[in-house]
Image: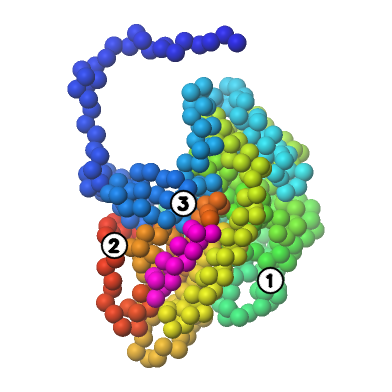
Amino acid sequence: MPSLTTAPDAHIRLLPAAKQGLPITTTTQGLQEIAHNHITKGLGRLRDHVFKEGKGLRVLTTDGRKLLDFTSGIGVTSLGHAHPDVTEAIIAQAQSIIHIQCAIALSEPYVQLVESLLTMMPDPSLDSFFFWNSGSEAVEAAIKVARASTKRNNIVVMQGGYHGRTSGAAALTRSKTSFFKGTGPLMPCVYTTAFPYWHPMGVPKETSEEELVRQANLSIDNLLQQQSAPEDTAAIFVEPVIGEGGYVPAPKAFLQHLRKVCDKHGILLLMLDEIQTGFGRTGKMFAIEHSGVKPDLIIYAKGFANGMPISGIVTRKEIMDSMPPGSLGGTYSGNVVACAAALATTTYMRTHDILGNVNERSEQIFAGLRAIQADTANGGWMIEEVRGKGLMVAMEFKDPNSTLTSSHSKGPNVTLPPNLNKLVQDACMDRGLLTLTTSIYPVLRMIPALILSEADVEEMLSTMREAVKEVARQVEGKGEPEQTGEVVGAAHGGAEGD
Ligand SMILES: Cc1ncc(COP(=O)(O)O)c(C=O)c1O
């Protein structure tokens, strides 16, 4: 192989600044000030701490705090921060070539990634791929493919579903209005059907799954008769575990009904948003595998490149081939460094028992959280429900604004605050544990790296136990808030959404 020159810019003259050095801020306070004054307020942020280093589930801040990360950057660093296999692949690729525009040439990692992914699909019919950068962009691509391949406009989405913040993806989002409030009109022709989750359905938590599914099935059946004729309906978008909407797994019978509806009308596509649930997160490689239902298209992103921005869609070749050349693409689409990272991540997943670890740790987490819930004398009474799938873990707290969860047995003098999830999250944060909140309900969620150990889980549970106990003490009026750590403050009103 011929070699290329390593100093192609030797002729570019240096400016005086090269000798003097450029000013650059390194202090935590200085960085926070720049962020405060010059970064959009449109970004929500949990706190203005600055992460400097990450290894596995540990993160170090610029002011020296060590945190246990049960967020994995919202389901992204699935092999843990800076996994050596992925880091090495990124370095090797960056030393070779960093950008190969997809309309100009193929790259080895792009094609090899396809080869790797083909072996991981839940169904062999899913055999045609397209890569983009973010989850939202992949959702945009899925909308295009759905419409182009069916020659129909209408899209059905789930109440509480989240598909992203770009224009089309936001039009499909039903988890919170904050993602699109004041920015309309959004893409038309989107219809909402019920998802089997007791809270938005306005029924008690004790309602049987069978009844929830019955009502949700009725909702989609009615929708296709009253709002969007099957002949006009291109696709149903569904997350197999509703993510931003509150970590609620879709019951198997519901997904089976959606599949039946799609098959009956022949022309509908079941578009599965596995952006958060895919690549081992729920204990199967894809969450749809829990149901045995065959999707027509899967949208993926987040956890399959361990931190590099890459997303994509996969569908059957005959569906993907409805897209003429040039209709899909983008400057960074399938960036070669991101593809190399995804190839390393998927190679790891294909050669290590990652699913075994997810399932073992999941059992440990759910048992531990249910024990905290059962310990009513130490705050467990505040927890309405512990739920999720695999390593998507949520606790929904009691909510004074909802007649469905407000009952508690602590007497008339105990007034429930509306944000128990945020209070517990804050108490965890003060003790060095990073968690997330989600949905319009008081839900606290955790989505740790898939490689977490038994000891990591024990540490999380012990912190969570203390946090719940401390918040309960405050709510029950038995104590002043404990000052256990520095509180930088949620300068942006806290984290908002995925
Ligand atoms: C289910 C789901 N769909 C879509 C998205 C949007 O992805 P992104 O934030 O990469 O645009 C997310 C992000 O959290 C998600 O969880």
Residue ID for mark 2: 485
Amino acid type, residue under disc 3 in the picture: Leu
Residue ID for mark 3: 57
Of helix, strand and loop, which one carries label 2?
A: loop
Is label 1 or label 3 in front?
3
Q: Callout 2: few (<14), some (14-19), or many (20+) C-alpha neighbours within 10 Å?
A: few
Of helix, strand and loop, which one carries label 3?
A: loop
Image check: 165 left or right of 480?
right
Question: Disc 1 to disc 3, how far (Cα)?
Answer: 37 Å
Q: Callout 1: few (<14), some (14-19), or many (20+) C-alpha neighbours within 10 Å?
A: many
Question: Residue at the location (73% across, 43% down)?
Answer: 126
Tell whether circle 1 marks a residue whose Cβ is less than 8 angstroms from ligand 1: no
Q: Quadrant of the N terminus?
A: top right
Residue range in magenta is 454-469
Q: Residue 23's spot in the image, x, y percent?
A: 21, 31
Decide which of 112, 294 is in the foreground and name it.
Answer: 112
Amino acid type, residue under disc 1 in the picture: Val
Q: Residue furthest front?
A: 455
Question: From this viewpoint, is residue 155 visible?
Answer: no
Q: Residue furthest bottom?
A: 412
Question: Residue at the location (51% across, 38% down)?
Answer: 84
Taking 335 as reference, is 276 above or below it?
Answer: below
Question: Disc 2 to disc 3, how far (Cα)?
Answer: 20 Å
Residue ID for mark 1: 213
Decide which of 302, 467 is in the foreground and name it.
Answer: 467
